[in-house]
Amino acid sequence: MARKSRKNVAVLEAPKQPAMKVWRAALYVRLSVEFNGKRGDSLETQRQIMEAYIALCPDIEITEIYTDNGITGRTFEREAFQRMLADVESGKIDCIVVKDLSRLGRNTIDTGYYIEKYFPLHGVRFIAVNDQFDSEDSENSGNHLIVPLKNMINEAYATDISKKVRAQQNQAMRDGEFVGARPPYGYRKDPANCHRLLVNEDTAPIVRQIFQWTVEGAALNEIVKRLNEGGIITPGYYHASCGLFSYDNKLAGSGKWQTRTVGKILADQVYTGDMVQGKHTNVGHKQVATKPADWIVVRNTHEPLVSREVFAKAQAVREKAAQRGKSPAKKVPYTENILRGRVFCGCCGKNLHRQRHQCGYYVYHCISNDRIGKGACEAKVYVREPDLFNAILTIIRQKAEVMMGEALRLKRCDGKIAAQKAQVDQKIADLGQETQKYKALLAGLYESFVKGILTKAEYLELREDYSGKISGAVERVQQLQARQAELERQVEQYTSMADKLAAMDKDTALSALLVNQLIQRVTVNGPEDVSIDFSFESGFERVREVLGSE
């Protein structure tokens, strides 16, 4: 007798009890920069504690582990934490587990916001294992007083530790010990004592040469040109080659010497053998420069690269050069560089240098040949600022006419957009019905398994199948909603941008506000050969689709 298939038995059984909700959990692990070295706080131990707890919870499945290694709990701008929040908002996870409240954060206000507002708003179950807190446990009803208190204790602890660390660092500075992450260019850390500087024979000769050239009267531009032509590795690239950071880190720079880099070396008293630290302090998690009077200077802590006499001569030469540079500047009134960082040479791709001209205006010109070396740029781009501004305004007005025309076409597509939204709404409704159908099937599976109608293998197979179809439908709904919302956002922004451009007239002047709103990049090949990359040219894919199908 043929065996009767039991694949669809669950469909015939009316569910008599609600299905157990399975939470998709994220384990969040954080190790602070103020880690005290105790084994109980290690990344591995935190993970083991949480995994042991979840092993006893049949309604929780681990979806992913997020780890922030060496990040203080006083800020929530952490890479893994922000990635976890993105996964919460995308629906990938709906449960967050931490070892204790301090791993989530040590900032009372922000930690309380996530526990009391953000997580409940997004339907996220929050569990702090060692603090015996579970937002889904009715016995936690009294924790609305205990949790904020623990958060305040955690923040006070972090503040106290930070003060102690800063005090210890300040004392080390006053003792002449080096406390920085990277040694100054020309030095290296002593392998036996990381707080002591030793001469780096690979880079020290370059520092000595820079000072020698300066004493001999070479300008910063000339020194930069010599270094680049000589193929001398920059401080940023040298530190990257030593593994102190990656080459794509902004600290590595472009790989070419700049006058600013040479100027910092020439102004640094560390090359006379004195330890100079405390030039910056942290204010609200940001580094702020301190006054020279507040710097911590300890003399004769390490071997000098230049004598005090050479250092003093270099400062005198730089001061004379600065005084000479000030005299012609008075002939041209200072104006803000509203195109800073946006104007590039069409030949070599480098930033154009803005300079005051004695005739009463500014000019933009390429200085690659002066800074990098002869032959670095063949174009020798040079343009007066008034001519550049006029060219930019002409291009903006031309773009305004195009956008206003497209905005009118977009308004004629209102009916098409509304019809598209109705189709999306219908698809979402259909997917909702499909989801409810599979939820009903899923609800009856466990009872069929308990009654012996389904084997364990069949139960697991069907559960995975139905859960996958539910997840697929939910994901599709999210995609449709996101796409529709993106279209509506783009239409609104595009129309708003067209209205702003329409308000321009022939008397409109180029301003910093206009540049920031419209311009991403200006490429100059000559006074009459200018092109613009507008900031709004990208990011309107949905609008382009509508206009393209008109």
Image: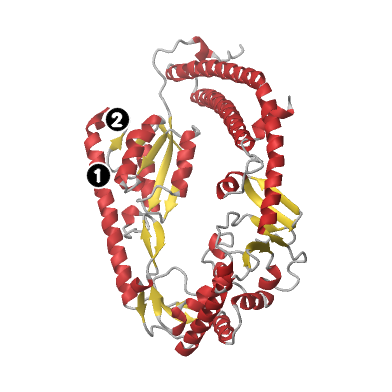
Q: Secondary structure at mark 2?
A: loop
Q: Kindly identify which numbered label has been placed on residue 230.
A: none
Answer above or below: position of 223 versus 60.
below
Question: For residue 1, which quarter of the picture?
Answer: top right
Residue at 26 percent across and 54 percent down: it is 157
Q: CA distance from mark 1 to mark 2?
A: 18 Å
Answer above or below: position of 377 versus 52.
below
Query: Quarter of the image containing the C terminus?
Result: top right
Could you classify mark 2 by the number of other residues whose Cα lies within 10 Å: few (under 14), some (14-19), or many (20 or more)? Answer: few
Residue 429 in the image: state x and y as whole percent: 55, 16
Residue 73 in the image: state x and y as whole percent: 35, 51
Residue at 45 percent across and 77 percent down: it is 191
Q: Which residue is mark 1?
A: 150
- Of 468 and 140, the residue lying toward us: 140
Residue 520 in the image: state x and y as whole percent: 63, 49
Residue at 50 percent across and 88 percent down: it is 310
Residue 238 visible in this rendered orientation of the protein: no
Answer above or below: position of 388 versus 276.
above
Q: Secondary structure at mark 1?
A: helix
Residue 449 visible in this rendered orientation of the protein: yes
Q: Which residue is mark 2?
A: 137
